[in-house]
Amino acid sequence: MTSPELLPDHRLELTTVVANNTMNRERGLTGVNGYARELGLDPVAHLLARSAAPRWLDLCSGEGLALRQAAGRLPDAARLTGVDLVGPMMRAPLPPTVELITASVTTWTPGPPYDLITCVHGLHYVGDRLGVLTRAAGRLRPGGLLVAHLDPASIRWADGGPAGRFVLAALRDQGFAYNARHHRLTLTGPRTVSLPLRYIGADPAAGPNYTGQPAVAAHYDRET
Ligand SMILES: C[S@@+](CC[C@H](N)C(=O)[O-])C[C@H]1O[C@@H](n2cnc3c(N)ncnc32)[C@H](O)[C@@H]1O
C-alpha cells in the first residue's frame, strides 16, 4: 500500500476540495434535502422540548440557513451558533438569536454547553474529525444530543489502510451510536470521550465519498 501525502489541517483548509464552491452550503431546516431529514430529527422540536432558552451549535454550518429558519420558531432566549470556515455570502440580516462564526472547527473552542450539536455533511472535509467529535461530546448539556454525518470509509491508517471498523468500534465503546444506512453518528451527552487514536494528517486527494462529492480522508495512528 502506498502512503498518501498527508497535510496538516491548516494546509488542508486551503485546498480546492475543502474550499469547493460547488458544495451544497444552503440546506434549509425542512424539505427533501433539509436538516430535519438529514439529521433524522426535527431540531426545533428537540430544542423546544429541552429548554426555554435552548442552545444549538451547528458545526460546518455553511450559510446557516437552517439556523436562520429555526430562529423564527424558537423563543427570543434561544442561542443558535453556526461555525464554518467560510463566512456567509447571504446578505439578509441575521435574526438576533443567531451568530455565524467564521473559523475552523478544528481550532475553534465550543462555548457554553448546548442542547443540540449538529454537523451536517461537514466532517467529510475536516482533517481531525475525531478530535472535533471528542470536543463536541463534552460540550453538551445533560441529555443534549450530538448528531453528525461520518463516513467510516474515509478514516484510514497511516499507510492508507481502512481504519473505519476500528474507529466505529472505539466510538461505540465511548457511547456513540452509528446508523450505517444514513451515515449518522449520535451521542447523548455530555461525555468525556477518549479514543485510542492519534491524528496524523489528511489526504485531500482521496476522491469522492458516498455523497458523490470529492472528500478528504483523515489518517490516524493507534495510540499504544
Ligand atoms: C457540504 S457543506 C454543508 C454545509 C451545511 N451544513 C449545509 O448542510 O448546508 C460543508 C461545509 O463544511 C465547511 N467546512 C469544511 N471544512 C471546515 C472546517 N475545518 N471548519 C469549519 N467548516 C468547514 C465548508 O466550508 C462547507 O460550508
Image (cartoon, rainbow, N blue to C red):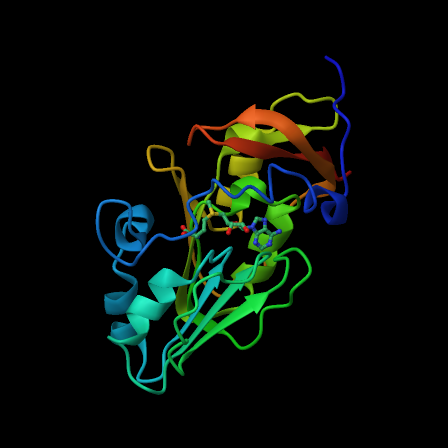
Q: Nearer the viewer, residue 8 or 170?
A: 8
Q: Residue at x 43, y 68 (%)?
A: 91
Q: Residue at x 63, y 38 (%)?
A: 16
- Quarter the N terminus occupies: top right
Image check: 207 left or right of 15?
left
Q: Position of residue 122 (x, y in %)?
A: 50, 47
Image check: 14 left or right of 18?
right
> Relative to 132, is 184 above or below?
above
Residue at the top extreme of this rendering:
1
Observer able to see residue 198: yes
Q: Nearer the viewer, residue 48 or 173?
A: 48
Q: Position of residue 111 (x, y in %)?
A: 57, 75
Q: Residue at x 24, y 55 (%)?
A: 30
Residue at the bottom extreme of this rendering:
77
Q: Position of residue 39 (x, y in %)?
A: 33, 50
Q: Nearer the viewer, residue 209 or 186?
A: 209
Q: Position of residue 155 (x, y in %)?
A: 60, 32
> Relative to 38, is 78 above or below?
below
Observer able to see residue 166: no
Q: Residue at x 28, y 49 (%)?
A: 40
- Quarter the C terminus occupies: top right
